[in-house]
Amino acid sequence: MLNKRNIIDIIYQVITYLAASVGVIALSMIIFFVFSNGLKLLNFGLLVNDYHAEFYNGGIDDPIFTFSHRPISLDDKVFYSQKWGIGLVDSKDREGNPIIIIEYISGDSPLLEIYDKNNEESKEIIGIDKGFLVSKISYYDKNTSLTMYGAESMINDIESTNEIREIVFSSLGGGIRGSIITTLYLISITIIIALPIGISTAIYLNEFSSKNRLTSLLRSLIETLTGVPSIIFGLLGLAVFVPLTIRFSEATSANIVSGSLTLSVILLPIIIKSTEESLKVVPDSFRSASLALGANHTQTTLKVVLPSAFPGIMTGTLLAIGRIIGESAALIFAIGTAVKDDISIFGKSTTLSVHIWSLMKDEPANIELASTIAIVILLIVLTLNIIVKLISKRFIKEF
Amino acid sequence: MNSIFEIDNLNLHYDDFQALKDINIRIEKNKVTALIGPSGCGKSTFLRCLNRMNDLIDSCKITGEIEFKEENIYTSNYDVISLRTKVGMVFQKPNPFPMSIYDNVAYGPRCQGIKDKNILDEIVATSLKSSALYEEVRDRIKESALSLSGGQQQRLCIARAIAMEPEVILMDEPTSALDPIATLRIEELMNELKKKYTIIIVTHSMHQAARISDNTAFFLMGELIEFDKTNKIFTTPKNQKTEDYITGRFG
C-alpha cells in the first residue's frame, strides 16, 4: 500500500529523473544537430587544406598530344579527354556551388606543361594535379567553356580543339588547417603562460599566505574576475596586449600571442580556483605528518601536497583548455577574425570558434561548414578529455 | 633524575581561551610518559608544544619555557626543523602519505638531503625492522602504503618517525583508531622502543597507561593535576581528582 511518504519519495525520484533527462536530451540534440549538418563535409581534406583557394591563370604553347587511353579504373562519372589526357568530374564545393574537379591526369598529358601566365617572363610551370578546380577554359577559335556548363561540355570543347588560350584553375579552398593550427598554438601558449602563474598563486593563497585582509581581498578580487564577461577581457586584450605585442615584436596587428595573453587573464581565476579547491581537499594530516618529519614548508608543498592535488589540477587544466577552445567573444578583438593559412604566432589568424562565428555572420550563413568545424572542436575536446583521464589514472595507479 | 624535557610555567592561549595553565613538568629520558585526562583537558595541545606543531595554528599564543636538552625551544632563532627531526611524532589516525611503503619511510631522510640509495635502503630496512613491520611488507615494499591495514599503517608511521633517528617520539593517541590486536602489537612495540627512545604518549585508555608507561601525568581543564610514577598514580594518588578520574567517577 502506498502511504504519503512513499508517494513523496516517488515524486522526488521522478523529478530527479526528469531533470537528468533534460540534460541528456539537450546534449544529444546538440550532437544530433551538429552531426546531421556537418558530417557530410567532414573528410581528411577539410582538415589539411588551405581555406583560401589559390587561383592560377595557366597558358600553354604548342601542346604535344600523346593520346593516352582512358584508364579502366576511372569511374563512369568522370569525363575523359584522350587528346589532353585529363579526366574531369562534376562536384560541389563546401558552400554547395557547382565545381569541376580534375579527377585524373595522365603522366604524359600536355597540360602538365602549363605555365603561369601572370609571370610571363619566367614561364614557370605550375604543376597542376589531381584535386584542382577548373573554373574556365578559353580558346582562340570558340566560346569559353565555363563551370556552369558542366564537365561533359568542357571535355567536349577541349577534345575538339588544338589550342588553348587560357585555362583558369584553382586549388580547392575551404579547408580549416589554419584555424586548427591557430587553435593548437593558442592552447599551448595560453597554458604555458597561465598554468604556472595560476598554480603558484593558488599555492601561495592556500599554503603560504596567512589569513589577513590582503589575502581575503585578493581572493574576492579573483572571484570577481571569474564573473566578468569575456568580451570585456577582449577589450582589455585590444587595449593592452595588442599594442604591447606590436611594440615588442614583429607583430603589426592582433596576433596569436595577444590572444593567448588575453585568454591567460581569463583563465587565471579559473585555474586558481580549481587548483585551490584541489589543494583544500588534501588532508591536513599529510601536511602535519610531513612537517613533523622535519620537512620544511616548501618540501611539504612540493612532495606531498601537490602530488595529492595533481588529478584535481589536471581536471582544472582540462576545463581551462575547453574554455580556450570555446572562447570566441574575447578573441574577436584579441586575435582578430581573419581566416589565414600561413600561421605564425605574431601574425593574424583565427581559431576554430571564431572561424565558426565568421562563417555564421555572412549572408547566407554557411551552417554546414560551421557544423563540421563544431564536430572537429568536439573531437578535439573529447581527445583531450581522454588524454587527461589517462594521465590522471596512471598517476593515481602509481600509489 | 635525567630529564630530556623541562617545562616551566607553560601557558597556552587560543585567542581568549586558556588551554594550558601554568604547567611545570620534567620528562625523563628513555622512559614512557603517559598523559591522561578527559577530552579537552589540554594533553594533546601540550604534546604538540613539545615539537612546536602548535606553530601552525595562528591563534595560538605560548608563554613560559620548554627546554629540550637544556635549550629553550621557544626562542625566535631556535631551529624548528632540526627540533622536529629530533622529536618525532605519531598521530591519532594513521596518516601514511599516498606513496609506496619505501618512499614513506625514506621521506624524512630525503627531506634532510640524503640521496644515496644504499644509505636510504639501509635506513628503510632498519626502521621497518625496529617497528616490527619488516617481515610483513618485505615483498611489497614498493607497493602503496594505503594497501596496508590500519595497524600496519600505524606501525609504518612509527617506522617513518624512527627513520629520522629521533630522541623523543610523541604519540597522540596512536591506538585509538585500531582494533585490540593491532593495539597490542603497538604496545609491544613501544616496550621495545623505550630502550632507545623517550616516548611521550597521550592516551584515553587508563589500562594502556598502566600497562606501558613508567610515569603518568594527569591533566584536567588545562592544569597538570598530578605527575608521578605510574604505579603510584594508579594505586595511591595524592589528589582526590586523580583518584576520581582513574576510578571512573567522572571523565
Image (cartoon, grey):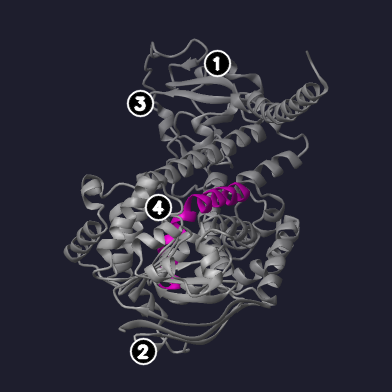
Tag 4, which chain?
Answer: B
Crowd band around label 2 with a 10 angstrom C-alpha radius: few (<14), some (14–19), many (20+): few
Q: Mark 1 lies on which chain?
A: A
Residue bearing the label numbered 1: A156
The span picked out in magenta is A296-324
The three-letter amino acid code for the residue at tag 4 is Pro
Mark closer to the observer (4, 3): 4
Disc 4 with disc 1 on a shared chain: no
Three-letter code, disc 3: Asp
Q: Marks 4 and 2: in contact by CB < 8 Å?
A: no
Q: From the viewer's perspective, is A16 left or right of A188? A: right
Identity of the residue furthest to the right in this view: A4
Disc 1 + disc 3, Cβ < 8 Å: no
Q: Crowding near pointer 3: few (<14 within 10 Å), some, many (20+)? A: some
Decide whether residue B151 is among the magenta residues.
Answer: no
Chain of the residue where label 2 is placed in the rendered structure: B
Horizontal placement of A149 versus A232: left or right? left
Which is in the foreground here, disc 2 or disc 4? 2
- Which dot, 4 or 1, sits closer to the camera? 4
**What residue is disc 4 on?**
B98
Query: Which residue is pictured at 40% across the width and 71% down the height?
Result: B232
Q: Name the residue under label 3.
A: A108
**Residue A334 percent coordinates (x, y):** 67, 59
Circle 2: element type: loop
Q: Spatial distance from mark 3 to mark 2, Cα to Cα?
A: 100 Å
Q: How far apart are marks 1 and 3 (CA)?
A: 20 Å
Residue B21, position as x, y percentages in the image: 58, 80
